[in-house]
Image (cartoon, rainbow, N blue to C red):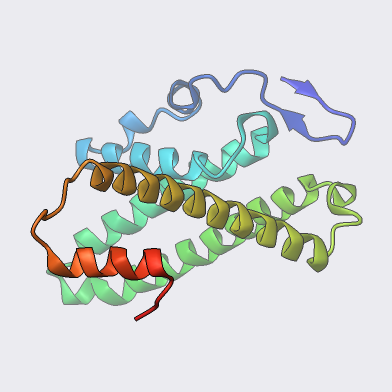
Amino acid sequence: MGGTGSGRRRLKDLSEPKKLLKAIMPVANIFNEEELKMYYALTDIYLQDFDEEDMTSSDLDDVINLAKNKVLEYRLLKESKDDVGKHLDVSAAIEKIQKQNDKIKENLSTRRKDRIDPNAFKGFSIVDLAVAFDDQKKMKLQDQIQKNKEENERIRAAHAKFPGNKNDTEKEQLEDNLISGKRE
């Protein structure tokens, strides 16, 4: 692992984070099969919140701990399900786990905020957002108008091929009026 200028350690290769997580924490030794599936599903979910190039070793430690704590919380709840006497002890342990999880989430959030470059959004105002929104809406409306025109032309072309009713007296009267300049 190599350091960066800001003192944070970045992970060099996260091409397969699941393999990395298995190597760091041998959870198969502490979790049963059901809990192991839950642990890996949770780590997959938590890892989706990160860009691979921004993830630090501290982030990975926190993801591991967060998933581990969730599985342990599940285990405690499952164990106390049928034993009323265990509920008080379990609830105290779960409260500690939840406080620890809150702290972990806060740490992850703080590090994520530290990665945001404040200069990346400098000069960006609400007017820019409004203009971008209007432009996007205008393009959608123009596309719809173009589609409607094409559909209208296609319908007109299809109707032009229809011969109509040769014996229609109203049609003859309308044509006579148009020729003489009269309007109905």
Q: Is residue 98 above or below residue 32?
A: below
Q: Which of 24 and 113 is in front in this view?
A: 113
Quarter holding the N terminus?
Answer: top right
* Percent position of residue 46, x then y: 48, 45
Q: Is 59 above or below relative to 171?
A: above
* Residue 55, percent from left and from top: 65, 35
Identify the residue shown where x is 58% and y is 36%: 60
Who is closer to the viewer here, 179 or 122?
179
Residue projecting furthest to the left: 167
**In the image, residue 74 above or below residue 86:** above
Q: Which residue is drawn at 57% across and 53% down?
A: 142
- Residues 41 and 152: in front is 152
The answer to whether residue 160 is visible is yes
Q: Quadrant of the C terminus?
A: bottom left
Image point 28% across, 68% down: which residue?
Answer: 174
Q: Can residue 80 be seen in this view?
A: no
Residue shown at 62%/58% (left/top)?
138
Instruction: Give the percent coordinates (x, y) of residue 155.
Output: 30, 48
Tell me if residue 94 comes above or below residue 47 in the rendering. Answer: below
Q: In this view, does 141 lie to the left or right of 171?
A: right
The part of the image, by quadrant, that contains residue 93 is bottom left
* Residue occupying the far bottom of the picture: 184
Residue 109 located left or right of residue 162:
right
Give whichever of 98, 177 is nearer the camera. 177
Coordinates of residue 153 in the picture (x, y in percent): 39, 46
Quadrant housing residue 30: top left
How many numbered marks appear? 0
